Amino acid sequence: MEATARNGSQDVTSRVTLSGLARAIERIAGALARADDSMPDPNGPPPLPHSSIGRWGVAGVDPDRSHYPHDRENPQHNTVGSLRSTTGTRHSNMDGILRWVRQLLSRIEASRVRSGWRPEQLTPASRRQLAWLHFLGTDGNLADYLRAVRSARALFTEVAPLARWRRPLSIHFLPTQSLYRMRTTDDGTRILLPTPMIVFDARGFSELARVMFGRRRHGRDAVLHDLMLGPSYQAVQSQLEGLGGGGNDTRGRIHDLADSFARVNAACFNGQMPPPRLMWSRRVSTLRFGYYRYANDTVTISQVLDHPDIPTFVIDHVMHHELLHKKHGLRWQNGRGHAHTREFRAEERSYERFHEADQFLRRLARKR
Ligand SMILES: [Zn+2]
């Protein structure tokens, strides 16, 4: 997997593309779409230990070694070409696919160490692809994925008018940003859905099928929209974004919002707060030190706080305030969104250094 940061320098602006990864992902999703016929039911009894080794071989890979053996004479041979050759392997069960995913991840990591690129240098597309791979490699997610493939296929088959698709129907949950895509060829119909839709239950897939196959009616999308903004979907979305290994978004010059979130989550929310997306604002503002967007579950912190003179407890206080918005939700009062309720304010003051931090921000707002 060639990923060359230009001249291996520390130039953050050089963009790294993980070429070949999109294709590998397509192959893996293809195997997963086909998998449900030959694979054990993920809800059924666990497979016998090591039953799959030997059947899922990836050419040239020793499964007990974490690194892909590489060609020292021709380092370029360690890259896309060899990746492509490994992804044609047919996998017969879930263990096999999981090991396939983890092998790819360790090869990407080896390539990263060799070439010296950093995750934050990846193009957004490569970052989404890498996140998808990490997500599937995480315990339990592959079983959820397969469950969703089965559920979606059963429901779509039931709802879809026969004239609109061709057997076999294959379902792919991919790092796509569209609501759905459908392609019919002689080989059948492929339906591409965004990865977080693996959390959909039967109702979710039924609604989706009505949007995809039915006559669009007003209000239909609203149901789907609500589901996509629901906590399960958003949790997967956040997890995927976190796994992208970005760092661009959370790491400022001085402070890292991911660290702040981790501290506040542990200290104030018992570690139970699902991570929102975290961003520094583009604009430097002292009017608003932070805000929370319900629609995309994002905490944005003003860039003005990314400064050596700003102590971390002040950033944590702003983080705490914004996370309380997420926790309390928007309450409507007299036709206006009124989020700073009495309970909100009371809980806000429970932050250990609330008064100190509040005073600090007041002074800062006056100074500018
Ligand atoms: Zn507020």
Image (cartoon, rainbow, N blue to C red):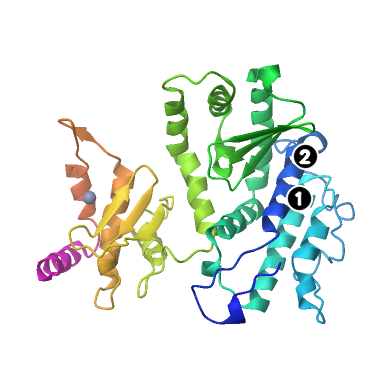
First in residue order: circle 1 vs circle 2: 2
Q: How far, Cα to Cα, is label 1 from label 2?
A: 9 Å
Choose top left, top right, bottom left or bottom right for residue 53. bottom right
Residue at the spot of label 2: 35
Look at the numbered disc 2 and give the secondary structure of its residue. helix
Residue under the point 54% across and 59% down? 244
Looking at the rendered structure, the secondary structure element under dot 1 is helix
Task: Report crowding for label 2: few under 14, some 14 to 19, many 20 or more residues within 10 A (C-alpha).
Answer: many
Region in magenta: 352-368
Relative to 347, 208 lies left or right: right
* CB contact under 8 Å: marks 1 and 2: yes
Asked if the beta carbon under badge 2 is closer than 8 A to the nearest atom of ligand 1, the reply is no
Q: Quadrant of the C terminus?
A: bottom left
Residue 243 screen position, x and y as percent: 54, 58
Q: Viewed as shown, does residue 1 lie left or right of 195? A: right
Counting from the top left corner in percent of width and height, residue 350 is at: 23, 56
Extreme residue toward the right, this view: 54
* Residue 268 appearing in the image: no
Task: Say what amino acid the circle numbered 1 marks.
Answer: Ile
Q: Residue at x 71, y 45 (%)?
A: 29
169 with respect to 16 (left or right): right
Extreme-front residue of the structure? 185
Percent x, y of residue 267: 35, 60
Tell me if residue 279 comes above or below residue 188 in the rendering. Answer: below
Res 5 seen here: yes
Say whether residue 360 is magenta: yes
Is 206 placed left or right of 300 in the picture?
Answer: right
**Residue 10, relative to residue 271: is it above or below?**
below
Tell me, yes or no, whether the highlighted magenta stretch contains residue 292.
no
Residue identifier under label 1:
97
